[in-house]
Amino acid sequence: MNKTNAIYELIKKYDAITIWGHALPDGDCYGCQIGLREIIRDSFPEKMVYAVGSGIPTLFQRLSPMDVVDEKTISESLAIIVDVSCLRRVEDQRVNKAAAFAKFDHHMFNPGEAFEHTSFVDADRVSCAEIIAEWAFENNLKVSRLAAEALYLGIATDSGQFKYFGTTPKTFETSGKLFALGVEPYTLMDLVYKEDASSVNFRSFLVKHARLDGNVVYCEIGPKDYLDNQISYERASGMVNSLSVFNSPVYALFAENGDGIIRVELRSNQGYPVQPTAMQFGGGGHLFAAGCTLYTGRGPKAIEVVKACNRIQKSEG
């Protein structure tokens, strides 16, 4: 049985399905959760299907809010994790109480984070939403306009609106199928990328305070930096792409949350694989978009990550 059929058959066995994503969900994670939920609900109307987590509140009115689920339902459910490599990285750790597990993902395998359950993983895909959309089409499942918009959101955001490494002809083919179901890209992406004055000002702050070290442009920020600019930690720590305006092969953002935890985001839009470096510091991700966690006062420092990034050689692929 192939991977797509294995997950399909597993879904048929359970009356309750819960869908989970990673902490600080992005467009791909949220899009996968809502898109997959709607596909299963419409294809199996007798099942109880829930998307669990914080989601992206600014998109709730356009797409859908997340669901509230009690622990009894979770304990009887098939938990499907999306856009996340292992159970340890799931945002809501109640996931571990589920009866069974499955996974859709496009992250590269990290040693020590095995997922010993049914899974469909393709690290060559630019988004997890692309995988789920193809799975739905291959199994002739019902894909509503809402599901299509949610999955299109995931593909468009994780591909940087179809310009990041990993975008392939298949990405456009799958997106075209979703588009034909009623997706309105302009109004949807307008909600995603429209920024208020605080966000615009903070992007300028990041650019102004960025430093250059060899092939790496990076910025370190703390609570005073983003709170003084009326930006939340969750929002600020994900704004690494603001540094892409520099012509540097690798860019990095180090954001401290006020409790000694530093979220590190590494990117390259010039073919420098940052994922092995993220793994070196206990993290992971995609080949050209990855991250890890540091801690103030102990362990590696930001400058050590920067120096490691300077040792990255450009991919020949």
Image (spheres, rainbow, N blue to C red):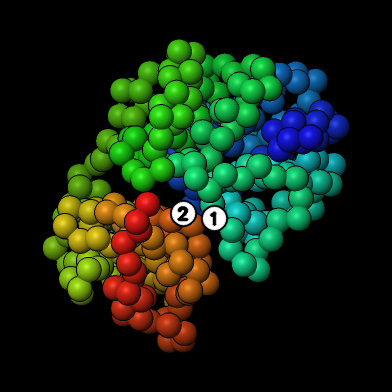
In the displayed structure, does residue 62 sit left or right of residue 3? Answer: left
**Number of numbered markers:** 2
Indicate which disc residue 286 carries: 2
Looking at this view, is 30 or 269 the one in front?
269
User: Residue at image x 52%, y 72%?
Assistant: 282
Q: Name the foreground residue: 9 vs 299.
A: 9
Q: Would you place residue 119 above or below residue 292 in this image?
A: above
* Location of residue 47 with respect to 286 vertically, above or below: above
In the picture provided, is 20 more to the left or to the right than 234? right
| Disc marking residue 51 | none
Q: Secondary structure at mark 2?
A: loop
Dot 1 alpha-carbon crowd within 10 angstroms: few under 14, some 14 to 19, many 20 or more: some
Left or right of 104 on screen, residue 77: right
Residue at the limit of the structure toward the left, as seen here: 208
Provide residue 139's location: percent of width, then percent of height. 68, 22
Q: Residue at x 61, y 21 (%)?
A: 137
The answer to whether any part of residue 54 appears in the image is: no
Coordinates of residue 203 in the picture (x, y in percent):
21, 53
Residues at marks 1 and 2 touching, judged by CB atoms closer than 8 Å:
yes
Which residue type carries mark 1? Answer: Met
Residue at image point 39% right, 38% down: 167
Q: Foreground: 68 or 108? A: 108
Of callouts 1 and 2, which one flags the residue occurring earlier in the amino acid sequence? 1
Occupied quadrant, residue 26: top left
Q: Quadrant of residue 3?
A: top right
Camera sees residue 2: yes
Please, is residue 28 above or below residue 62 in the view?
below
Q: Position of residue 100 (x, y in %)?
A: 81, 46
Label 1 sits on a secondary structure element that is loop
- According to the picture, the residue beneath numbered tag 1 turns out to be 108
